[in-house]
Amino acid sequence: MIVADTSAVLALLDLDSPHHVSVRAAFRAHRSEWVLPWAILPELDYMVSKNGGPAAAQAVCADLADGRYLIEWDEAGDLERALELGRTHRDLSLGLVDGVVMAIAERLDARAIVTLDLRDFGAVTLKGRPEIWPRDL
């Protein structure tokens, strides 16, 4: 599995992003393996609406509803693990979203996390040691 962070999905959607080409290539090559953690959805909706407008946000929500992206919902222990990661890495001030993305990546034994947030994701060593894409591609 490949777990996507908000920043990766935004780069995938934004043709002007300097990371669009590399994230799109990773998505196209591994589309069936990509999962979007439930916790990124409100953040994604907000950022797409803020930067692309209401029509873009509605289009993304329609894609989600139509099953264009696989969503990984919470399981017992994900929130607890997210909080544990936050306590362990207090110096990073990990937020709930990043913690949940990391916890889900560990639970799924993800091959990679797709993110542009190297400050947080690059500093935390997770169980299974998933790659960070596009950095590690």
Image: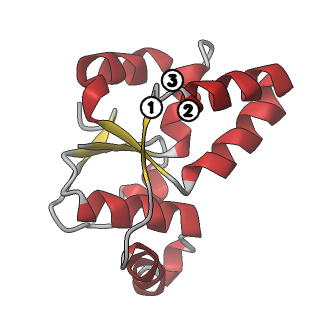
Q: CA distance from mark 2 to mark 1?
A: 6 Å
Q: CA distance from mark 1 to mark 3?
A: 12 Å
Amino acid found under the numbered disc labelled 3: Leu
The amino acid type, in three-letter code, at marker 1 is Tyr
Residue at screen point 46% across, 76% down: 79
| Vertical arrangement, residue 108 with respect to residue 137, above or below | below
Comes first in the chain, label 3 or label 2: 3
Q: Could you say which disc has been placed on residue 64 in the image?
A: 2
Q: On the rendered structure, is 104 left or right of 96?
A: left
Q: Which residue is mark 3?
A: 12
Residue appearing at x 52%, y 33% in the figure:
9
User: In which quadrant of the rendered image does the N terminus lie?
Assistant: top left
| Camera-nearest residue between 75 and 103 | 75
Q: Residue furthest front?
A: 66
CB-based contact (under 8 Å), mark 2 and mark 1: yes
What residue is pinned by disc 1? Answer: 69
Q: Are there few (<14), some (14-19), or many (20+) residues within 10 Å of tag 3? A: many
